[in-house]
Amino acid sequence: MDERKLGQEKVRYTGVVDVNIVLVSLFENPLRESGIDFLGEVLSGNKSAAIPTSTLLGAYHIATRYLSCSRDLIAKEIEEFLSLDSPAFVEDISIEAVKEAVNIAMAHNIESWDGYLVAMARSFKAPVIYSLDNDFKKIPDISLVVPFSEESVKEYHRWVEELLRR
């Protein structure tokens, strides 16, 4: 499945968006504005990428459990994000996709979520995954694209490290 029907229009994806790209757009941090700008490009169709709706569950979990963000704030941000009507949103995860994700994760020694994104990208014949996660470099038929500047990513990582030390 490399395309999705939306009404009569077919949508083709050339990439898949990882949870960490969605995550940084949900709360105040050094990558927030860049994350919002990037996702705006995806949601408007200027950048052809799929956003699995399951990434919002992962973003909520990471933001509230590990980064100590307000549950109310993150829930509100996610509700607003999902209220945008965009063909970029892909309602996902079948049993077969989970099986394939686990097999990819095992074969490449990556996290199961990353295996799932690889499986989804392959199903769309989309060779790109937008992420901050270098594990995607292990996958020969997938190109990792970090949609933020290297300096912005370093600043974000320093910010997270400082936050976790508190």
Image (spheres, rainbow, N blue to C red):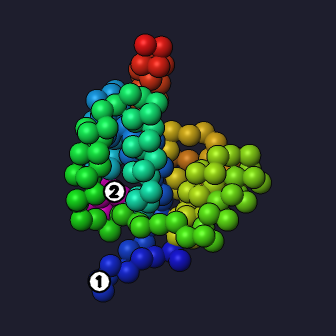
Residue 145 spot, x, y in % from top left: 50, 46
Q: Is residue 10 above or below residue 46?
A: below
What residue is rendered at 23% in x and 60% in y? 84
In depth, the one of 24 and 39 nearer the eye is 24
Closer to viewer: mark 1 or mark 2:
1
Q: Is residue 47 above or below residue 10?
A: above
Secondary structure of residue under mark 1:
loop
Q: Which residue is mark 1?
A: 7
Q: Which residue is mark 2?
A: 42
Q: What amino acid does circle 2 point to?
A: Val
What residue is rendered at 51% in x and 74% in y? 2
CB within 8 Å, label 1 to label 2: no
Q: Residue 87 sits in which quadrant?
A: bottom left
Is 146 one of the magenta-colored residues? no
Residue 96 spot, x, y in % from top left: 63, 71
User: Magenta segment range?
Assistant: 41-47
Identify the residue at the far right of this view: 107
Residue 153 visible (yes or no): no
Secondary structure of residue under mark 2:
helix
Q: Is residue 63 above or below residue 141?
A: above
Residue 20 spot, x, y in % from top left: 45, 42
Identify the residue at the far bottom of this view: 8
What residue is rendered at 28% in x and 29% in y? 28
User: On the picture, is 53 further left or further right than 134?
Assistant: left
Residue 48 spot, x, y in % from top left: 39, 62
Is 43 one of the magenta-colored residues? yes
Q: Quadrant of the C terminus?
A: top left
